Each structure stands twice: as structure tokens, then as C-alpha cells.
Image (cartoon, helix red, strand yellow):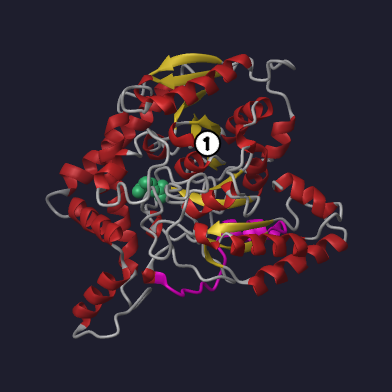
Amino acid sequence: MGVAELAAAIAGKKTSSVEAAQHLLARAKQHESLGAYLAVNEEATLAQARAADARLAAGERTPLLGVPVAHKDIFVTRDFATTAGSKMLQGYQSPFDATVVQRLAAQGVVTLGKLNCDEFAMGGSNENSAYAVAHNPWDASRVPGGSSGGTAVAVAARLLPAATGTDTGGSIRQPASFCGVTGIKPTYGRCSRYGMVAFASSLDQAGVMARSAADCAALLSAMAGPDIDRDSTSLDHPAEDYTALLGKPREGATATLPLKGLRIGLPREFFGEGCAPDVIAAVRTALAEYQKLGATLVDVSLPRTELSIPVYYIIAPAEASSNLSRFDGVKFGHRAAQYGDLIDMYKKSRSEGFGPEVQRRIMIGTYVLSHGYYDAYYLKAQQIRRLIAQDFQQAFTQCDLIAGPVAPTVAWTIGEKSNDPVANYLADIFTLPGSLAGLPGMSVPAGFGAGGMPVGLQLLGNHFQEGPLLQAAHAFQQATDWHTRTPTGF
Ligand code: GLN
């Protein structure tokens, strides 16, 4: 069952939160070889489920009461170890819950466990996890995407109704696309970063994956909202009820044309030769459906799309090198068993604790911030980042939403790109621009491409346009059934 269906079943006493949690824990165990989970704690989950059932018995009714979900292992949790997919944090037990986790728990959401991800969310295939290979449920020889790979696997394989993720440069949208599930990354600052293990603080944003836009709306309504006392970049913008919004027709809509008047911009840079023909074909078919629903398609341009790769791969490692300095074996993280002096202790601890991709980014980041290179790389990248954001504002004078592919190809084979960091970085080309501009974005299942693998349609909105994005995705899902397709064997 999806979120809404399961919530209704629990509220209607057809099942209980305990029963649902037990069932989903058993399913997680049965499909352990997918590598979706990094931590479970049955006792803690069942205690939370019993508490939800008690709230229900006491007459409480909230839209998510008793619904079990799991969290990307980037969110710190009191009841479950948090590793961020890194040996550096093996066995780390947080004394508190991340704001996102806490807000969902306040609504009666039950935590099933922690989900696999690339180490410190650095990656786009989940192959940088220090713990487990994650497999795409549509084809176990392929990657699920990343860094929120475990989240996408768990939702796609129906191990749970929904799960949280984080997106710094595409880590919700791309795995959602690769695994055929719906994902939303809100406006930067919309969900609190408090308790999210930091990667690149000016880009990191929490979000959610589920089967449908409606289910994403239900979760996001509970997660989003200001947390200004604990996150200095949290936006002081009131929480919204996205579920209620989906129930209301858009202004100007008719029964047969629910998206009448909606202008969807197609950036010509997203449809060029850098994108595989099977992906373009699926995206174009989805866009034709949008036209049937009343939307009009307009050509727009995001001329600095290509620059988003070098810009992101300067800014994100720069911020990472600073954020990860706290993992020194003293303040946080693994400490080497044997060492000479203090410097040797730092060196050994960090060399043992961090995997190769994280070490690479720390080195790049340290380099671009160093005296003499700061102006040439970091400052330049910040200036181009501003221009990329301006390009979007220019495009949004011609359209309400922007659409295109999420990634240039469908999910690749495990191992195919693992020795080629640049090949991995290039695959982020369509998600990075929106991230650098701080915009909300979605991936909506839109069909299948090469090898029968899922293809997602990316929708991007202007700041705070989560509502219209979800509305556009929801209307599409009312008219199509791509989001209901389930991989064989699940
Ligand atoms: N793939 C990108 C990277 O490797 C994005 C990761 C993310 O969004 N967390 O940095």
C-alpha cells in the first residue's frame, strides 16, 4: 500500500501500525540482498508503532498516524545508528533526532530503519557506500542511482510506502528516475538541515520519495517549514498543506483540462545530443500527455547548463572539505587504533575512515579554497552560480514550470563507471542547474527506456513552487499509470 491507503487502513482499524511495521520489517529481511537498509532496530520500531496505535485508540487522527517509513542514513536518529554510509561514523549514535525525523514522528510516523546511501551523500550510483552494494529492483545488475539509492530501492521494491532522502546535486531526483518512483526536492531551505549530516551546506536539502505525487505531498506537508532557531538557512515561510492543494482545481482548469493555462518551458540545452534517444523519447511522450491535459509547451534556454558541472564540482567539494574537517577522530568519527603523534593520529584516522571518493573531494575542495586559487576557482564558481540562477529567472518569465530529462541515460550497470569519477560527474548535468539555483524539483515516472529501465520526467519550479509542481505531477499521474508499475518479483 501507498501512504494514503495505508494511513486509511490503519485509521479504519483494518490493520494496525504494529502489524504494518512487522509486515514491512519482514519484507525488508526477505529482500535484504537489495542492499536497501543499513540499520534496523525492530524493538525501537515496534515501540514507536505501539505508541502510534495508542494515539489512534485515544481518538487522535492525523493524516500519517501509524504509517511506517525509513530515513536516508544522512538524518541522525536517536533510536538507530547513523553512519552517512561511511566507516568514519560506524556505530555512531546520535543523542537527538533530525528536525525532519522529529516532525514526521510528531505526526505519528514510525521509523523502520536507515537507508543505504553514497558516503556522505557523495555520488550518483550508491556505489560509494562503505557498507553495501544497492541493487536496482528493475535489474539487479544495475545501480539504483544515488546518493539516496537505498530510498529509491526501498520505495520501488515496495519495501515501504515512502522514505526520506536528501538532494545536494540530484540525489533525490536521479535515483527516483532510475528506480521508477516519484521524488521531490523542495526549495533550498524549505526543510530544516538540522540533524542532516552535512555535505555541501549551501545545496543540501531534504525531500521525499514515494509511489505518487499525492503521497509525496502528504509527507512533505509534515516535513517542511521553518526551523530558524536551529538552521540558519531555514526559510521563514509557513508550512503548507500540499494534500489540500491537490484536492483543489488549478485556476482556469476544466474537468478535462486540469492543467489548462500551465506553461511548461523546455530548455533546449536539455534535449540536445547529450541525452540518450530512449530517454528523450520517453520524456517527449510524457510531455505530449501534458499537452493533452491542457498545458502548453514553450522553448526556453538555460545557456549555462554545461557550466553547472564544473561550478558544482568546485563549490560542493569546497563546502565538503570544510564540513568534513570535524571528523578528526577527536571531535567526531573513527580514531585509528595505532598512531604516533597528533598529526599522525589525524592522518591515520581520516585515511582509514573516509573512502576514496570522499578523500578525492576533500582534496579538490581544499585545493580550490587555498590561497592563490580561491579567486581563480571558488570565487569564479560562485559568480557563475549566480548567473545560472539568473538564467532560470529569465526562463521563468516565459513559463510556469520547466521540464526535461532527469539524467542523460537510464541506470547503468554496477561497476561500469566506478573507476571514472568524471563519467559520474557528467551524468549530473540536468539536475545540477536546479540545485545551484536552489529551486524545487521533482522526478515523475514517465515510461521506460533502454533495457526496460524506468525514465523519469524532471519538473522544476521557481522558489516555493512545490505546490504547483506536485499539482502538475498529480494531474499527470491521474491520467497515466507509470507510477503504479512495479518491478517483477516485488
Ligand atoms: N551526484 C552528485 C554528487 O556526487 C549529487 C549528490 C547529491 O545530491 N547528494 O555530488
Camera-nearest residue between 409 and 234: 409
- Circle 1 crowding by C-alpha within 10 Å: few under 14, some 14–19, many from 20: many
Q: Position of residue 257 (x, y in %)?
A: 68, 15
Q: Which residue is drawn at 75% across and 50% down?
A: 6
Q: Which amino acid does label 1 sit on?
A: Met
- Which residue sits at x=61%, y=27%? 472
Residue 126 appears left or right of 309: right
Residue farthest along the left direction in this orientation: 372
Residue nearest the observer in this picture, 374 or 180: 180
Instruction: State yes or no: residue 249 in magenta.
Output: no
Vertical placement of residue 405 versus 97, above or below: above
Residue 340 locus on image (x, y percent)? 19, 86
User: Eyeballing the image, is 154 above or below 47?
Assistant: above
Taking depth in this image into account, of 147 and 131 the one nearest to the observer is 131
Pick whichever, 217 or 25, lies toward us: 25
Q: Confirm whether residue 239 shows in the render.
A: no
Residue at which label 1 appears: 442
- Helix, strand or loop status at disc 1: strand
Residue at left offset 73%, top offset 36%: 244
- Specify the segment rendered in magenta: 89-109
Judge left or right: residue 212 versus residue 368. right
179, above or below 288, in the image: below
Q: Residue 120 at what x, y percent from top left? A: 39, 59
